[in-house]
Image: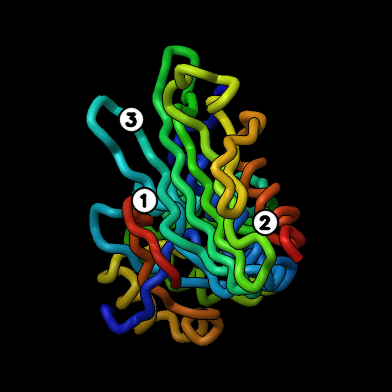
Amino acid sequence: MSDFSATTAFRLVRRLAMGQGSTAMYLLVYEEGAQSSIEADLSAEVEVQLSSSLPMGRVSEMLDHGEALGLADAGSIRVLRIDRWSPELVVLLDTHVIRLEQTGAQFLFLATPALAEQLLVEAPNFRNRLTEVLRIVPDDPSAGGPH
Amino acid sequence: MILEHPSKLRLQLRHYLAEQTNHGKLKRTYDEPRLETHVGGLQELVCEEVEFQSESRLSFNILMEEEHTGWFVKRFNFDLHLERRSINMIRIELKQKMGRDPLRVPRCHFHIGDSKAHIPFPIMNPRLMLHLICEHIEVDLGL
């Protein structure tokens, strides 16, 4: 899992801003305990760079409520946190991956290393359509310098 | 002048600099400015140096303090070094305190080239300052 390139919300949203209007699906792997900072970073960067809010949902809510990834209200960028493993999750993502692509939206799937690894193994259709798998780390306000 | 929280201002300034890179004005993308916390809750945004395609170099720092109505700028310093120009440097400063003789040294002033003069300058939002420097001062000063 540690082989994936590292990114921050700043760099990722810069990339998303350049690709607005075309579908993208990123699986973002974060270390346990970093979830709330990562989500706050992503929200803040989307607000500053794209002047919009960032809808966030949990896949478990969709499974519990029988929603098909909430596509009806998908904005241009949408975060889906994969918060628990279930066989239905694989069905949901593998079955609906084509529909995700057809929305033209950019999807950010957040997962812990363990959930991400399991998903990549058991959902090959989803895996093959991912734009990239990245390791996302919290923004460090005290760091500086060029990229 | 009441401003956003320094962490938000940091993102806004970093985004502005990144857009300058997108437009080909800066040489690369920078993770600048960084945010430093000082004793007493003062926060300082520090940009060590960004380099323009023209090889001009800009550094700045902005010291902010929280008061009951919001965040205020206590001091700032924008330092622009120009390459291959008749004017080699401009520095815009907001002093932390008013000097003894504000007519000789206004609290906000700029220095140009090797002149010792303190030329009055309006106190402006740091975002506007950065815009002014990148879009106007760096572009044609001393050409």
Mark 3 to mark 1 CA distance (whole Å): 15 Å
Mark 3 to mark 2 CA distance (whole Å): 27 Å
Q: Amino acid at mark 3?
A: Leu
Tell me: residue B129, above or below residue B123. Answer: below
Q: Are marks 3 and 2 in contact (CB under 8 Å)?
A: no
Tell me: residue B52, above or below residue A71. Answer: below
Q: Nearer the viewer, residue A58 or B117?
A: B117
Location of mark 2 (residue): B134
Tell if the residue under mark 1 belongs to the same chain as the one under mark 2.
no
Circle 2: is it few (<14), some (14-19), or many (20+) Cα within 10 Å? some
Location of mark 3 (residue): B42
Q: How many marks?
A: 3
Tell which circle, 3 or 2, labels the residue nearer the N-terminal end.
3
Q: Position of residue A44 (x, y in %)?
A: 51, 46
Which residue is located at x 38 percent, y 79 percent? A5
Nearer the observer: mark 3 or 1; the answer is: 3
Nearer the observer: mark 1 or 2; the answer is: 2
Location of mark 1 (residue): A141
Q: Secondary structure at mark 2?
A: helix
Q: Are marks 3 and 1 in contact (CB under 8 Å)?
A: no
Q: Position of residue B10 (x, y in %)?
A: 48, 46
Q: Amino acid at mark 2?
A: Cys
**Could you tell me if residue B55 is visible in this image?**
yes
Q: Amino acid at mark 1?
A: Pro
Q: Nearer the viewer, residue A109 or B47?
A: B47
Q: Is residue B141 left or right of residue B109?
A: right
Q: Nearer the viewer, residue B39 or B123?
A: B123
Q: Quadrant of residue B53?
A: bottom right
